[in-house]
Amino acid sequence: MMLNSFEIILLIMMQNSHPSALLNNLNGHYPVLYSFRRCPYAMRARLAIAASGIKVELREILLKNKPQAMLEISPKATVPVMQLTNGAVIDESIEVALWALQQNDPLELISAGDNNRQLELIATNDFEFKPKLDQYKYAVRFPQKSIQSYRQESEFFLQNLNDRLSIHAFLMGEQLSLADLAIFPFIRQFAAVDRPWFESSPYVALVSWLKQRVESSLFIQIMQKYKPWVAVKTPLIVF
Ligand SMILES: N[C@@H](CCC(=O)N[C@@H](CS)C(=O)NCC(=O)O)C(=O)O
């Protein structure tokens, strides 16, 4: 659970009166997550962490101004990046998600479907669908083809997901799984490119699944807005 506004204010007040004591007390007790609110990979990590109930220190970053502290531990410079309390660094979203759920998985997201099949579907999302999504979303940067062609080339994945969701409530069966959480932020991005098209598309089960996921309390929780983290100045945000 996240701190509520009252607890955050209390932390800021305490920090103002005893800054170093508070930082020393809390920093280092939590893994640190560098995140960017609108990044679908970072959403995947935050969703899994929130579902696990594990507390981390959230450091919101700006992609155009990445903090030195993050670049030092992960020169590949993508979010999410997680630094564990023992110093180990995990800088792939699926690995952050698996790390969190392997500690604690009260919703049984990992066992909700065959593990390899979940990972395979997530890999199809990341390596086959995501490049098509980028071309569709930023079609002006790829003038070789029309936006409609890029959309058509993405539809193999929409069809795959819609077929699954036509026979059961979630991607892996009747239970919410890691695959649902890991994939829907990307479908949300796809839907936003041309919402009227998506909503009147033949992928009816997919549209309804996306609506449910976006309206879920878990998603609302992980989309809370925070100011970008500034080394030293920003109060600890426990997420
Ligand atoms: N394979 C990585 C991909 C992460 C990724 O590409 N994140 C984007 C933001 S959505 C990023 O940080 N890009 C670097 C940049 O824009 O500078 C993962 O799963 O964590």
Image (spheres, rainbow, N blue to C red):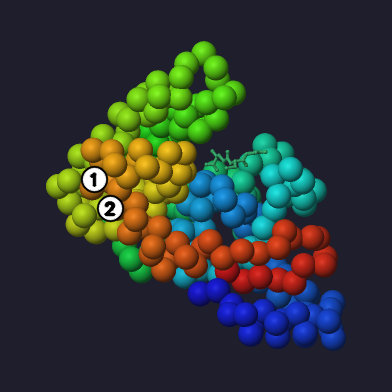
Badge count: 2
The label on residue 208 is: 2
- Please state which of residues 28 and 109 is positioned toward the viewer in this rendering: 109
Residue behind mark 1: 204
As helix, strand or loop, the secondary structure at mark 1 comes to helix
Residue at the location (32% across, 33% down)? 157
Local SS, label 2: helix
Mark 2, residues whose alpha carbon is within 10 Å: few (<14), some, or many (≥20)? some
Point out residue 180 in the picture as x, y percentages from the top left corner: 34, 51
Could you tell me residue 176's position as x and y percent? 29, 58
Where's residue 202, x and y in %?
A: 23, 38
Quarter of the rendered image showing ligand 1: top right
Amino acid under disc 1: Val
Query: Residue 189, percent across and down?
Result: 46, 43
Q: Quadrant of the C terminus?
A: bottom right
Q: Is residue 194 left or right of residue 231?
A: left
Is 208 placed above or below 154 here? below
Task: Give the residue displayed 75% in from the left and 80% down from the top.
Answer: 12
Residue 25 falls left or right of residue 53 = right
Mark identifier at residue 158: none
Question: Which of the pair 26/197 is nearer the observer?
Answer: 197
Q: Is residue 203 left or right of residue 141?
A: left
Find the residue positioned furthest to the left: 167
Q: Are marks 1 and 2 in contact (CB under 8 Å)?
A: yes
**Dot 1, crowdedness within 10 Å: few (<14), some or many (≥20)?**
some
Identify the residue at horizontal 40%, vertical 58% (top origin): 214
Residue 177, above or below 150: below
Pick the front one: 224 or 172: 224
Give the Cα distance between marks 1 and 2.
6 Å
Residue 230 visible in the current orientation: yes
Whether residue 119 is visible here, answered yes or no, is no
Foreground: 147 or 54?
A: 147
